[in-house]
Every structure is written in C-alpha cells, then in structure tokens.
Amino acid sequence: MGAPVELLHNEKDDGPVVEAPSIARAPHGRYFLFFSSHCYSSPYYDLKYASAETLRGPYTRARRALLKTGDFGLSAPGGATVSADGSRMVFHADCGRQSAWKRCMYVAGLAMGSESGIKSNVHLGSLSGAL
C-alpha cells in the first residue's frame, strides 16, 4: 500500500464533514467521486460528486448536489455506491415521517456523461423505491 493521497477536503458549503466516498469510472474513462456532506441526521445531508481524468485527481466538484432533501420526495439522502456497470446508484435516506430516525435504502438509474472533456455531468433516473 502506498502513501495516502488527499482527493477532496470539506469546503464551507459542506458543513463540518465530507464522508462516505465512493469512486466509479465511467465507460469513457472519467472518474467520478461521490461523497456526502453535513450529518445524516440533518436535512442538509446530501450527495455530491466531483470528477477527474485520473484516479488521483485533481477532482473538480460539480456545481450542484446530485441529491438533496426534497429531490424525489426524499429527506437527507447520501452514502452512495455505484453498480459495477455504472448504470445504478444505491444510497440511503430517511424512510419517511412515520419512521423517525430510520434510514431506508434506495436505488436509481445513473448515467455518467462528459461535456467537452473537462466538465462532467451525472443524471439520476427514476427512483425505484425502498429496497
């Protein structure tokens, strides 16, 4: 094992923490680093991503969160993992108002794209519901 390499650090907009990192390589070769910011027990908990041409970076953050409270009717989504073929993303979020402090797992379709080789975009498809 080699020495650790810093890929990303928290910024003011992330609150006190960035956590739950997961890296996926798109078919066109670009790397996507998915991560969560804030605390999972907060409505500000979200799922963000950054991309790079190489595994070691440098990583460029997307301008907006990929998932945040309110998207798909979810509250505090985060902790994402991408399927081996890159077509699906599994993540957790609050289960709903009736089940306070419980977390459920969700899956959504995923498409990792590239714009002009520098900026990258990720699009989530329909939400398949709690697993």
Image: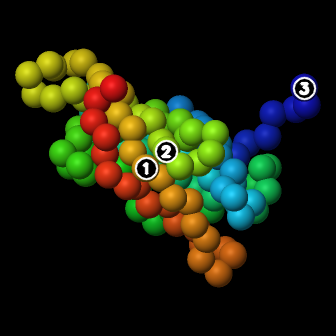
* Badge number at residue 101: none
Mark with earlier residue (2, 1)? 2
Where residue 34 sits in the image (x, y, percent)?
A: 55, 45
Q: Nearer the viewer, mark 1 or mark 3?
A: 1
Q: Is residue 121 visible?
A: yes
Figure label count: 3
Bin the neighbour count of mark 1 within 10 Å (Cα to Cα): few under 14, some 14-19, many 20 and up: some
Q: Amino acid at mark 2?
A: Arg
Q: Residues within 10 Å of mark 3 (few under 14, many from 20)?
A: few
Q: Identity of the amino acid at label 3?
A: Met
Q: Amino acid at mark 1?
A: Gly
SS type, badge 2: strand
> In the displayed structure, does residue 126 sit left or right of residue 123?
left
Residue drawn where x is 88% and y is 32% of the image: 3
Residue 30 placement (x, y as % from top left): 70, 60
Q: Residues within 10 Å of mark 2 (few under 14, many from 20)?
A: some
Q: Quadrant of residue 6?
A: top right
Q: Are marks 2 and 3 in contact (CB under 8 Å)?
A: no
Any part of residue 17 in sight = no
Q: Which residue is mark 2?
A: 88
> Going by the picture, which residue comes out furthest to the bottom?
116
Cα–Cα span, label 2 and label 3: 30 Å
Q: Earlier in the sequence, mark 1 or mark 3?
A: 3
Query: In the rendered structure, are the residues bearing label 2 and label 1 in contact, judged by CB atoms less than 8 Å apart?
Result: yes
Which residue is rendered at x = 53% and y = 49% of the image? Answer: 87
Residue picked out by circle 3: 1
Q: Are marks 1 and 3 in contact (CB under 8 Å)?
A: no
Nearer the observer: mark 2 or 3; the answer is 2
Q: Which mark is residue 109?
A: 1
